[in-house]
Image (tube, rainbow, N blue to C red):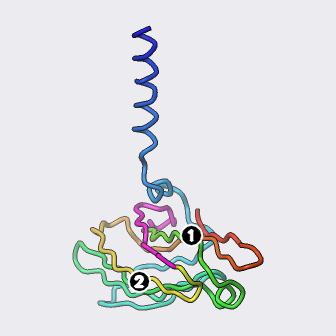
Amino acid sequence: MKTKTFFVALLCLIFAVTGCVPTSELYIGKPVTSAPIIEFQKAEITAGTWQTFDVTINYTYTVSGGLIEIAGQGELSQHYQMMYNRVRTMRVYLFLLDADAIILQTAEIQAFLMSTEDKFTFNIPFKANESMKGFSFGYRGVASDMDGQTYFDSLP
């Protein structure tokens, strides 16, 4: 009986330890194929807009020595602002990419949106390395109104 209890406890421990991977790390090694990709430029400060049908993110970044700092503000597109009034969930990710658009590193951006008109801001520093050539974003969310809800995402 003790052996069976020990075995069951060991299996539970193994499942608990292996299940503790942050969601953002699940994308490392996957290619970004359906979202805009921003290649790093040599300029001191670079600004731009990353946009899909669902989300618009205005960003700035600096590449200085061994550090990359990406900051910005994002919001849902006009479609969601006009058709829905509430955001049930929203997860936004920043992906650092190599020359082949393979994800090398990720960070989850805290996007606490209640209304479809809310905005989220971020400022994320990374240690740079030679293989980092650009970045992109990904997201998954649910918007709702009195008549129902809709799911939207753009993830690798």
Q: Find residue 17 and report its horizontal and vertical position in percent.
A: 39, 38
Q: Find residue 72 and report its horizontal and vertical position in percent.
A: 41, 85
Give the residue type at disc 2: Thr
Q: Is residue 18 magenta?
A: no
Q: Is residue 103 magenta?
A: yes
- Residue at 31 percent across and 79 percent down: it is 69
Give the residue type at disc 1: Thr
- Picture disc at residue 89: 1
Sequence order check, earlier mark of 2 and 1? 1
Question: What span is in magenta?
Answer: 96-113
Which type of secondary structure does the marked residue at label 2 adopt?
strand
Q: Which residue is mark 2?
A: 121
- Residue at 46 percent across and 59 percent down: it is 24
- Residue at 59 percent across and 65 percent down: it is 155
Locate residue 24 relative to residue 145 in the image: left or right: left
Q: Which quadrant holds the C terminus?
A: bottom right
| Closer to the eye: label 2 or 1 | 1
- Picture disc at residue 66: none
Q: Residue furthest left?
A: 65
Q: Do labels 2 and 1 touch, CB within 8 Å? A: no
